[in-house]
Image: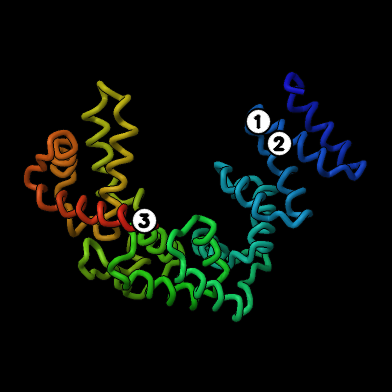
Amino acid sequence: MTNASQDNLLSLAQKAQANNDISQAKQYLLEALRMGHRTDIVCQLCSIYLKEDQADQAYILLKEEPDLFSDSEVFKLYLATLEKMHYFIEFLQLKNLLNKNIAANVECVDPEKQIKIMQNFQQLKNITQDDYLQLFCLSKENFVNFAKSLLFNPSQGFALRISLCEDLIKLGVDETISVYVLGKQEKFIPSQTELLEKDAIYREVCVSIADYLRRDPSKLPLMIGEMNVVLGMLYPKLHKYIQNPDQFAHDFRHYIDSKNGGVNQDLLEKIYQYLAYEKSNNTF
């Protein structure tokens, strides 16, 4: 089987489906995907997952697709998955992103389930990605209000803060939101804020670090990963804390190497103090 081509495996999967041997069909398709990515195989597998009420598996596969919109079959399956999962918030984000009405019947869960989702989330000590995605089942009003309450907590972890801020941005929320950055209350308007990786400050710092490490590219992934954490601690107020991206990138590199952060010494020390606190408390 390991020597079979993807086309042969796809053909075997189709025959298995015709014989109602869905389990075997899935195995053929999974084996085909292990040989390399192909969108048509992903679509067949997702179709099976949806028919078997395994929309969560279809969602995982589809979110790995490089383009959810250009291929009509992929987009159709994506919408069907959002409908099955009741990911109403992601559907609204999609409408805002594409700036058009979309013919799909994606609805939030009933009010009682929404209350339970919010109550359960507040009781979690260690939040997983699956836990967070449950918030997509809320109504827009409940999601925004719940996000505001979470962001108003000064002890909230930076990763959760980034996720909430970026989801409010994707929703196009145009009201002023309070958020804590390095223990200080700040305000931002999601509709007027860029996603972290699209922010000009973020991009300039990345370019500066990449330019510095062009002769030693093996160190770049580790340095960029560390930089993501540091900038994440300042998000969504990068422009308040960083006025000179090149200088910050320079000071960041030296701080990592020798704890000498130059003109950004105090800021970098504060970032790492808060980061150490979050790690010790296992925040999301």
Q: How is the image coloured?
A: rainbow
Q: Which residue is mark 1?
A: 34
Residue 114, percent from left and from top: 57, 76
Against 11, is 242 above or below? below
Q: Nearer the viewer, residue 66 or 25?
A: 25
- Marked residue nearer the N-terminal end (3 or 2): 2
Q: Residue sitting at 92 percent across and 41 percent down? A: 19
CB atoms of marks 1 and 2 within 8 Å: yes
Amino acid at the residue labelled 2:
Leu
Image quadrant where one finds the C terminus: bottom left
Residue 144, percent from left and from top: 44, 73
Q: Which residue is mark 3?
A: 282
The answer to whether 235 appears left or right of 141 in the picture is left
Which dot, 3 or 1, sits closer to the camera? 3
Q: Quadrant of residue 17?
A: top right
Q: Is disc 1 placed on a helix, strand or loop?
A: helix
Instruction: Check disc 3: other Cα within 10 Å, few if <14, some if 14-19, many if 20+.
Output: few
Q: Residue sitting at 51 percent across and 71 percent down? A: 120
Q: Residue sitting at 36 percent across and 48 percent down? A: 197
Number of residue marks: 3
Amino acid at the residue labelled 1:
Arg
Instruction: Check disc 2: other Cα within 10 Å, few if <14, some if 14-19, many if 20+.
Output: some
Residue 78, percent from left and from top: 64, 54
- Marked residue nearer the N-terminal end (3 or 1): 1
Which dot, 3 or 2, sits closer to the camera? 3
